[in-house]
Amino acid sequence: MSDIASVLRELGLREMNLGACTGEWIESTDGKVLASINPADGSTIASVMQADGDAYEKVAKKAHETFPS
């Protein structure tokens, strides 16, 4: 099996990834990070910056614009 860095690259992911997207990735300002853990050995696969309230507001606004009710 490929090493984890190769798999991440194939998926378009990095070791650190942004956590909210409106078609473009939004960087969070609160600095909190969530680790994605490999259940087989407990190692960190990759990390995701947790989105803050402002990022979620942008995502919700974009969703409402894209899918009006």
Image (cartoon, grey):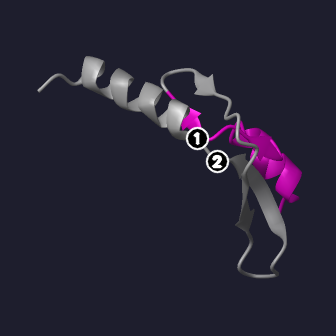
Q: Quadrant of residue 57?
A: top left
Q: Position of residue 65 (x, y in %)?
A: 28, 17
Label 1 packing within 10 angstroms: few (<14), some (14-19), many (20+):
some
Q: Position of residue 12 (x, y in %)?
A: 71, 36
Judge left or right: residue 5 versus residue 40. right
Q: Which residues are magenta?
A: 1-21
Tell me the amino acid under the disc marked 1.
Asp
Q: Is residue 6 magenta?
A: yes
Disc 1 to disc 2, C-alpha distance: 6 Å
Q: Kindly identify the residue that appears in the image at 68 percent across and 30 percent down.
A: 27
Judged from the image, the secondary structure of the residue bearing numbered disc 2 is: loop
Q: Nearer the viewer, residue 12 or 21?
A: 21
Q: Nearer the viewer, mark 1 or mark 2?
A: 1
Q: Is the residue under label 2 in contact with that under label 1 (CB below 8 Å)?
A: yes
Question: In the rendered image, which residue does mark 2 sit on?
Answer: 50
Q: Is residue 55 magenta?
A: no
Q: Quadrant of residue 60?
A: top left
Q: Kindly identify the residue that appears in the image at 58 percent across and 40 percent down.
A: 52
Judge left or right: residue 9 versus residue 54. right
Tell me the amino acid under the disc marked 2.
Gln
Q: Kindly identify the residue that appears in the image at 50 percent across and 21 percent down.
A: 23
- Position of residue 31 relative to residue 34, above or below, is above
Question: In the rendered image, which residue does mark 1 sit on?
Answer: 52
Q: Position of residue 46 (x, y in %)?
A: 78, 55
